[in-house]
Amino acid sequence: MTQVLVLVELVDGALDSSTPELLAAAAQLGEPAAVVVVEPAAALAAELGAELGALGAGIVFVASREGAGSQLVTPQVAALEAAVAASGDVSAVIVSNSTDGREAGARLAIRIDGAYQSDAVGIAAADGGIVVTQQAFGGSYTVTAGTGRGIPVISLRPHSIEGAAPAAAGTVREIDISGDTAVTTEITARHEQTQVSERPSLQTADIVVSGGRGLGSKEKFELVEQLADSLGAAVGASRAAVDAGYCDHNMQVGQTGVTVSPNLYIALGISGAIQHRAGMQSAKTIIAINRDADSPIFEVADFGVVGDLFTVVPQLIDAVNARRG
Ligand SMILES: Cc1cc2nc3c(=O)[nH]c(=O)nc-3n(C[C@H](O)[C@H](O)[C@H](O)COP(=O)(O)OP(=O)(O)OC[C@H]3O[C@@H](n4cnc5c(N)ncnc54)[C@H](O)[C@@H]3O)c2cc1C
C-alpha cells in the first residue's frame, strides 16, 4: 500500500489536536506515515513514535533541527520533502488547514511539483486516484475535484473526517534536513498575551457558540459566553457584533473572519448573512435562536428556535447545567 504523509504540528512540544484526524484521513487513502520536526533530543523521537503509532502512523519520519521551534515553516517543508524522497512511494500528503499547515503544504507542492488543494472538507479514494471535497463561493456550493498531476498535497479543515485510524507500529525513521539551506524566517521575540479564558480555540473547538447584533451590547454579549462556558465551547461572533464592539475581532466568524467547522454551532441573534454563513455552514449541526422566523440563518439550521434569545438562552443554560449535575 502506498504511504500517505501527514505533517504533525507540535504545540509546546505536544501533538496538535488536529493530529488524530489527519492520520484518520490518511488511513482512508493508504498507509499513514507521520512527519514531524523536533529540536534535537533523542528521547523525544521514541516518545513521538509510540504516541503517533497509537494514532495510526506506521512510520514516523523525524527530522531534528536546532532552533526549529523559532523558525517559520521551512524546517517542516524540508522534512516533508525529505520524507517524500525517503518513502519513495507516497500517494498524498495531508496537512492541517492551519496557518502553518497551509503555508507548508503550498511550499511543498511547489518543491515536488505536486497539486495543492486547500481547505478540503472531505477526502476519498476513487478510481485509483483521490477525490477532494471543498466548499466554493462562500460555502454556497460543495464541489469535488480530482487531484491533478503529481503527488497531491491537501490541507484538511478540522472536524471534516470521522473515526480514527487503527493503531500501527510507529516505527521511527530519522531523516536528515541539514542540507536544506532555504532561507528561514526566525521568530526573534514573543509577546505573551494574557489568557482571558480557558475556552478552546475557535478554529478547532467541538462546539462554537456565536453571538450577533441581536445581543445588543457588550454587557449582554456575556450571555453568549455563559452558554459557551456551560457547554465547554468556544465563543464566536458575527461581524456586526465585532464592529459594534461587543467582542474582540479575532472572534469573527465568516468570509472575512475565521472559518469554523465544529460538530455543533449555536447562532444567537445572528441573521445569517451569506458572509457569515461562509464561515460556519460546514458545521455538522447548526442551532439558531432568532426572534425573526424569516431570518436566513434558519435556511442552514438543523434546529431553530424562534424567540427572544434573552428568554431562551438563560433557560438553555439552566438545562445544560442541570444535566451536567
Ligand atoms: C465584504 C464583506 C465581508 C463580510 N464578512 C463578514 C464575516 O466574515 N462575518 C460576518 O458575520 N459578517 C460579515 N459581513 C457582514 C454581513 O453582511 C452581515 O452584515 C453581518 O453578518 C450581520 O451580522 P448579524 O447577523 O449579527 O446582524 P444582523 O444582520 O443585524 O442580525 C441580527 C439578528 O438578530 C436578531 N435579533 C435581534 N434581537 C434579538 C433577540 N432579542 N432575540 C433573538 N434574535 C434577535 C434579528 O432578528 C436579526 O436576525 C461581511 C460583509 C461584507 C460586505
Image: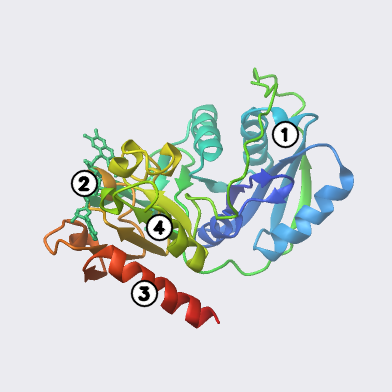
Which residue in the protein does label 4 denote? 224
- In space, the residues marked 4 and 3 are separated at their CA atoms by 13 Å
Per the image, the residue denoted by label 1 is 69
From this view, report whether residue 34 is shown above or below residue 102.
Answer: below
Q: Residue at x 45, y 57 (%)?
A: 225
Q: Nearer the viewer, residue 17 or 87?
A: 17
Q: Is residue 194 visible?
A: yes
Disc number lying in front (2 or 3):
3
User: Which one is in front in this view, the residue at disc 1 or the one at disc 4?
Assistant: 4
* Residue 303 lies in quadrant: bottom left
Q: Position of residue 211 (x, y in %)?
A: 34, 53
Horizontal side, residue 73 vs residue 271: left or right:
right
Q: Nearer the viewer, residue 11 or 32?
A: 11
Between marks 2 and 1, how big is the CA–CA gap?
A: 39 Å
Mark drawn on residue 315: 3
Q: Are marks 2 and 4 in contact (CB under 8 Å)?
A: no
> On residue 274, which mark appears?
2
Disc 3 secondary structure class: helix
User: Which amino acid lies under the numbered mark 2 shown in the image of this protein?
Assistant: Ile
Q: How many marks?
A: 4
Residue lying at 58% horizontally and 66% vertically, measured from the top left: 165
- Name the residue nearer the viewer: 124 or 247: 247
Cβ of mark 2 under 8 Å from ligand 1: the answer is yes
Q: Earlier in the sequence, mark 3 or mark 1?
A: 1
Nearest-to-viewer mark from 2 and 1: 2
Tell me what residue is drawn at x 54 percent, y 28 percent.
Answer: 111
Q: CA distance from mark 2 to mark 4?
A: 22 Å
